[in-house]
Image (tube, grey):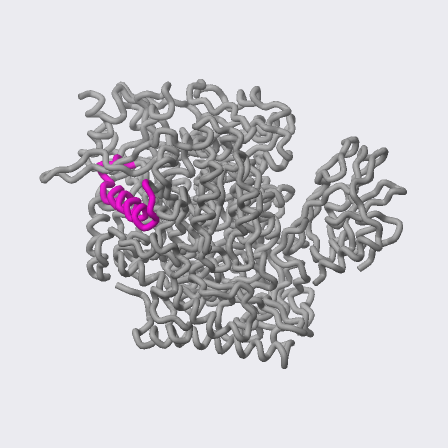
Amino acid sequence: MNAPANLKYTKSDEWFDPATGAMGISDYAQSQLSDIVFVEILVEEGDTIEAGKAIASVESVKASAEIYAPAGGKVTAVNKGLSDKPETLNSDPYGAGWMVKVEGGAAGETLDSAAYEKHCEERSH
Amino acid sequence: MVNAASTAKHRPSTGSGPVPPLSAKIVEPTVFDLSSPGRIGVTMPDPDVPETTLPPRELLRSDLPLPELAEVDVVRHYMHLSSFNYSVDSGFYPLGSCTMKYNPKINEDTCRLPGFLHTHPLQPIETVQGNLLLMYTLQEWLKEIGGYAAVTLQPAAGAHGEFTGVLMMRAYHKSRGDTKRVKMIIPDSAHGTNPASVGMMGLQVVQVPSDERGNVDLKALEAACDNTVVGMMLTNPNTLGLFDENIEKVIELVHGCGGLMYGDGANLNALLGIVRPGDLGFDVMHFNLHKTFSVPHGGGGPGVGPVGVAARLADFLPEPLVGMIEEGDDDTAPLYGFLKPAKSIGRMKAFHGHFGGGFVRAFTYIAMHGPDGLKDISQYAVLNANYLLARLRDTYRVPFDRICMHEFVAEGRFEGSDVRALDIAKRLIDYNFHPPTNYFPLIVHEALMIEPTETENKDTLDAFTDALIKIAEEAKTQPDLLHNAPSTTRFGRMDEVKAARELVLCCGLPEDYSNQ
Amino acid sequence: MSYIPISPKERDAMLETVGVKSLDDLFEAVPARHRFPMLNLPPALTEMEAMEELSGLAQANENVRSDLVSFLGAGMYNHYIPSVVDHILRRGEFYTAYTPYQPEISQGTLQAIFEYQSLMAALTGMEVCNASHYDGATATAEAVNLAYAQFRGKRRKVVVSPAVHPQYRAVIRTYIQGTDMELAGDNPNTDLDSQPDELATLIDENTSLLVVQYPDFFGRVYDYAKLIEAAHAKGALVCIVANPTALALFKTPGSLGADIVVGDGQPLGIPMWYGGPSVGFFTTRRSFVHKMAGRLVGETVDNRGQRSYVLTLTAREQHIKRERATSNICTNQGLIALGTAVYLSLLGKKGLRQVAELCYQKAHYAAQQLSQIDGMGLCFSEPFFHEFALCLNRPVAEVNAHLLDHGILGGYDLGQDYPALKDHMLIAVTEMNSKEDIDMLVNILSEVSHG
C-alpha cells in the first residue's frame, strides 16, 4: 500500500495533488479493482466541476467503479492516453495514471496520507 | 465506490501451472478454421419460376464471407463442442439462484409439435385457437399459483419482467397524479437486475441492509419509506435462501407510505403450494418459467418472464393479453383472442412472447404436476437444501444459519488459509460437480450459494457433501490442489485478463469484409 | 407425474438429519394464515395423458406446413430448416446447461457463441456482435439506449423511420417512456412514398440515433449511404434494423456506414413458433463495445496453453454495474443463437446466397403476376427483396377470409398501422412457396378482384 505524503485522499479512494491540480485513483483502489481493462473520462477540458462529481468510469476484469472528483475547479487537462492503456492505472496510479487536472477550485473533504492509510487498513479486515 | 463480484486478484492460476506458449494449441477449430472452398452443407432446389434479373450491382454485396462445410463437418464440430459442456443431463448442477432442475424430456417433444412449431404470430385468431387456449390457460394457472388478478406472458426473461413490472408501478402512480415518486427501495442482497431495471428508467435506488438474521432491516426500511417511494423490489425467499420472518411487516411499511411491492420470482421454486406471493401483498411479481417451471436454460437463454399483478395494476399490463373474446355454449367452443388493457404501458417485445420454447414447456410441466405435485416440488427442493446445510454447517461457516428455503449461502474460506471460494468451486469440478454460484450475494464474504433443487436423490447429495468436506480437508493439507484446479478437465483456468485486454470477439473475417 | 427421485424412507432419514419431523415443519417462517393454500388447478396428468392433451391443442391450430400455404411475413418468415439444426439443439449438453460462468466446463457453449458472434459480424459487415438479445424489437430498443449512453444523456432525440416495423417502434416507445428521450419521424401518417433521405431534415445536434430498416417494413431496399453520411455530419449514430437473409444478397449495413446493426435472427433456421423465442442480434463497431449491453464471448488461452473462450468485459453488465449498467439484460437467447450458428455454418457462403436468391426470384415472380390483375397493383416502385405491398380494391380482411377458405394464409393488412395504406396487403414470399402456390394465389386474387 503506497500513499505519497504530498497528496490528499478521499474515503472513496481518489487522490488529489494540491500542487498540480492533478487527480486520480489510489494504489489501494487499483489493487482492489485488480486488472483494469477500461477507463472512460466523463469530463472535458473547460468543464467546471465540483468536488464529488463523477469524473471517470473504470472497469476491471471483475469490478467496476465510478471515480469522483476529490476537488472542484476548472478542468485544464484530461489524460486522453488512458483509454488506450487502462493498465497504466494498475502500474502507475500516481504518475502516468493521473486522470484529470483542475485549477482554481477547492478540495472537498480529504484525508492526509497517514489518515488515509489508516482508513485503508481498517477496510482490509 | 467499487461494485465487484470479487475484489481480489483473479489470475488463471495462482499455483505453479505451466506458462501459456505464444501460439495457443487448438482443441477444436472454429467453423471458419474448418472451412474449405467448394464444400456444401445443404443443397437448395433450383428456382421453379421464370428468372428475374437481380437488382442493380451497386445494391449488392460482392462476397459473403461465411464458411463452407459439408453436413458431416458441421455435425461433428458441434458434437465435439457439446462434449466440452457440463449440463444438468450429465450431472449435479447446484448453481444457487438458478434452479437447475431436471428438464423433462416430454417437454422437448410437446414444444415441437408441428401445430406449435409452424404457426405464424399474425395468423387470424380463428386458425390458432389451440395456441390461444394454451396461453389463456397458462395465464389462469399462473394467476392461481401466484395469487394474482391478471398475468401477462409477454416478457422474455426475468429481467424483462422486472422492467415490465417497474414500468407498471410508475404508470400506476402517475395515473393517480402522484408524480413525485422517484425512488425504489432494494435490499443489499438483491440480484443486480433489480437496480439495473430501475436504473434503465431513470429512477433512484435506495439500498436497505439486511439484519443479523438475514431479514430486511426494518429500522432502515422504515426510514426509507416516504411519499417519494415508487415501491420496493424484494426477492423472498431472498438470495441467502431465507424467508423473511417479518415479511408482513415489510409489506405493511411499504404500502403504508403509498408504495407498491414488487416480488422477484427468481426463488419461486421454494413457494409452490406453500404460499402465494399475491396473498402476502406483493402487488407485482415476475415468474421465471425457465427456473421454476422447467424450461431449460439453453446455455444462457431463452428465458420466459411472465408478470402477475394485483387488481389495481391490471389495467397497466403490456399489450396484448389473451382473453376470451366470445364465451362458448353447449355447441360452440369459446373464442380466444387478444385484448389491450385500458392503460397499457405498451408492448414489451414483438409478437406474443416465448410461446414455443417457453409457454408450451411450462404448460406441459404444470399440467403434469397438478396442485399436489407442485407442492411436492417446493417441499423437496427445501428438504434437499436443508439436508445439504445440515451436513455442511460444521465444515463451512454459514453466516445466516437457520432453516433455509430452497438454497443457502456458505462461506468458501477457512481460518489461516489462502484458499478462496473460487478455488473450492474449481476443485468441485474435479469431483465432477458443477460449482455453486460464487461471489453472490455481495453481503457474504467468499460466498458459495448452493441450490440443489428437488430433482436430486440422496446419494447425489451425499456424494456432493462428501466432496465438499474432502475439499475442506485438502484446503489445509494440499492447498495447491485447489489453487490449480480443475486438473481433470479438458480445459484449465482461463486467462480472463488477456481476454479483456486483447478483446478478440470474432474470428475468420477477411480484413475488408465490412466494405463488401 | 413426479420427477422427484427420493423414496419415503430416504425422505425420513433426511428429515431426521435436518432435525424436523415433517416436510411441513420446514415452513414455519411463512405466515401461518397464508401457509399451504389449496391451489385450484386440474389434477396431475401422466406423460401419456399430457402428450394427448398437448397434441390436441397443437392440432386445433392450422399450421403453415401441412394446413395452409403462407404468404404472411411482416417480421417472421417461413423458411426451410435443415434437419441438422434441431438435432444439435436437442443435445442435452447444450440445452440443459446454464450461462457459461465456469468456462472450464462450458467451452461448448462459449465457442458456439463466439462463432455466432463471428458469423453475424460477417453477415452484417460489423466489427463486434454480442451474445444476443430477446428479439429484433428489443435489440432495436437497446440500440436506442446505447446511443443515449454514448452521449451521456446530452442528446435526447431519436429519429425513427416510419418504415421501421410498427411493433419495433412500439417497443422503443415502451422502453423510453418516462425518460427525457423524444422520438421524431415515428409517424404512420407520413408520406410513405417520400425518400428516406428526407429523414435527414429531422436530424440535428440533439439527435443521438437514427433508426432505419433494411429492407424496410414494406420490403423496399434503399442505399442508405447518403442518409447515414448526413446523420454522421450532425454527430448522430445510425442503427440499421436488418433482415439477415437479405444480407446474403444486398450490401452490408457496415459498408453503408451504419454504427449499429440489429435484427431478428428467426429467418436463420429458427421455427416461427407462434412468435418466439427467436433471437435478437446486435452488432456494432468496436468503439461502442463498452456501451453495448449483453454478454460477450472473447478468445483467450487456458493455463495449459490451449485456445479457449470466456465471457469477457463482464463489468459492463448488471450483476456488477447494477443501477449504472446500460441495460438490465441478463438471460439472453443462447440456445437460439446456437441454432442460427448451426444454420449459417451449414448453409455457408453458397447456401445462404441461394436461399436469398430463391426468395428474391419467387417474390418478384409473384409481384409481377399479381400486378397484372385488374384493380390491383404494386404500391411502391423501389427495388424490393422478398416482401412487397399490394394494393387491393377491397378490404384486406375480406380478401384474406376468402383466401383462407382456399387454404391460403394471406398477407399482412397494412391499413392496421398506416391509414394511407388502407386496402394494402404486405405479401411475403420465401423459398417455401412453390410456383404452384404462387399461381394459386394469383388465380384466387383474380377471382376476388373480378368477383
Tell me which residue sits at (49%, 66%) in the image.
B84
Q: Main secondary structure of the magenta part?
A: helix
- Establish if C188 lies above or below C138: above
Q: In front here: C246 or C267?
A: C267
Q: Position of residue B8 (x, y in %)?
A: 67, 61
Q: Position of residue C429 (x, y in %)?
A: 34, 36
- Residue, x 44% and y 57% (percent of image)? B243
Residue C245 at x, y percent in the picture: 43, 42
| Location of residue C70 in the rendering, given as x and y in whole percent from the top left corner | 28, 38
Q: Quadrant of the N terminus of chain C?
A: bottom left
B350 left or right, relative to B231: left
Query: Is residue C104 in view?
Result: no
Residue B473, picture quadrant: bottom right
Q: Compared to B325, does B487 lie above or below? A: below
Residue B124 drawn in magenta: yes
* Quadrant in the picture for residue C390: top left
Task: Please give the count of numbered marks on the rendered protein.
Answer: 0
B142 drawn magenta: yes
**Residue C289 falls in image quadrant:** top right
Q: Of residues B505 and C248, which is closer to you in this image?
A: B505
- Which residues are the magenta region? B123-149
C294 displayed left or right of B121? right
Answer whether residue C433 is visible to the viewer in this image.
Answer: yes
Image point 32% across, 31% down: which residue? C412
**Residue at the (52%, 48%) spot, across then down:** B193
Quadrant that contains the C terminus of chain C: top left
The residue nearer to you, when weighing C210 against A34, is A34
